[in-house]
Amino acid sequence: MKDGSFPIEQFRTTKTPFYYYDTALLRRTLDTIKTEATRCGGGNYHVHYAVKANANRKILRIISAAGLGADCVSGGEIKACLDAGFSPDKIVYAGVGKSDWEINLGLDADIAYFNVESIPELEVIDQLAGEKEKVARVSFRINPDVGAHTHANITTGLAENKFGIAMADMKKVIDIAATLKHVEFVGLHFHIGSQILDMGDFVALCNRINELQDELERHQIRVKNINVGGGLGIDYQHPNEVPVPNFADYFQTYRKHLNLRPDQQLHFELGRAVVGQCGSLITRVLYIKQATYKQFAIVDAGMTDLIRPALYQAFHFIENLSSDEHKETYDVVGPICESSDVFVKAFDINRCHRGDFLALRSAGAYGEIMASRYNCRELPVGYITEDFE
Ligand SMILES: *Cc1c(COP(=O)(O)O)cnc(C)c1O
């Protein structure tokens, strides 16, 4: 065994490709989140795990057991969370296009609140809650028009994005909610994007929220919960050196810059930062192919198993778990019939041979959950450490 953190002996009898989740690291990450959130917010900081990053049942169970809430973006995710033991009063539900059955599911389960993204949606929730003689708790997702220094496909808080309600309409929707019998306004929600490493982006969000709160207070409007979404990034370049994101810095940024009113609760929706570093996609080298100017390591995993490089030009550090030999330069590519089925170009890896195990690191978030069956491929299985003990 080369790297102590991978049970490579057990890997030999496991069909590749597959996801491997290091649960010791996941638990360490969850402990850090709880410690740092409590240090900064006492009992007023609450973290909801953004389920869309990874809804593997075993992972969800570990996260719910750690006491985090859940941030869902579909009825399917709400079901997965109820199934995995999340308490409904810690489930929140966002999304620009909630179907009636999804709203009804949330109402029946009595989730904490809906993050509402438009006036027509608010009216439908009021109507459906009325049919059940219930009152739905709603929070308004406000588009803060704050840019995040991240990939264009994953910024969400700019005026041009489809998400949320414009700031100029905030007061109006709160007033409308006050006239509706079956909704109760409980908070404001924001989410500016993903893979954010510049704390200045979160500072900009805090400043914007402070302004909005001041404006509401001039109208004697009090807000129970402020939900600042997620977006904290991970270090894809250095998965071994920085396995746990800097949560201390993250929560301190909010403590320092967000003017939280007494009794107000601050909600976070972290996805990538919770699960990203604990997961690896494990694949075998099929062939080493020498081309005119380069050499390819052709592996049995493809963009159907991990689409991030093809979709966002994302980088995943790749390690050869089977070889200690000198490094050589490879393009690591999959077997899918698409030119974008490339994991990395010109990357140095310990010399590869047919049958070697490669680990594509930092693949715990937006990996397994985005897998597809394109080319009639089987979906990759997700294993956790305990599966190999
Ligand atoms: C995707 C998403 C998150 C989580 O984002 P991460 O970058 O994974 O932390 C949080 N809230 C909402 C509304 C989202 O859509």
Image (spheres, rainbow, N blue to C red):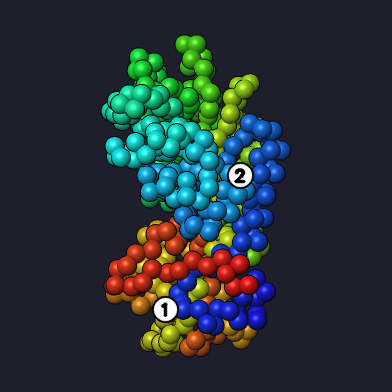
Q: Amino acid at mark 2?
A: Gly
Check the picture and name the quadrant holding the N terminus.
bottom right
Whether residue 35 is visible here, answered yes or no, is yes
Q: Is residue 195 visible?
A: no
On the image, numbered disc 2 is attached to which residue? 67
How far across and how far down the image is residue 342, in percent? Answer: 39, 71
Q: Are the residues tagged 1 and 2 within 8 Å (C-beta)? A: no
Q: Is residue 115 left or right of residue 247?
A: left
For numbered disc 1, what is the local secondary structure? loop
Residue placed under numbered mark 1 in the picture: 300
Q: Position of residue 47 (x, y in %)?
A: 57, 41
The residue drawn where x is 58% and y is 44% is: 68
Looking at the rendering, in which quadrant would you find the C terminus?
A: bottom right
Most foreground residue, 82 or 385:
82
- What separation in Å lies between label 1 and label 2 (alpha carbons)? 37 Å
Question: Where residue 309 appears, x then y in whole percent?
Answer: 42, 64
Q: Is residue 131 above or below residue 270?
A: above
Please report whichever mark, 1 or 2, sits nearer to the chain's N-terminal start: 2
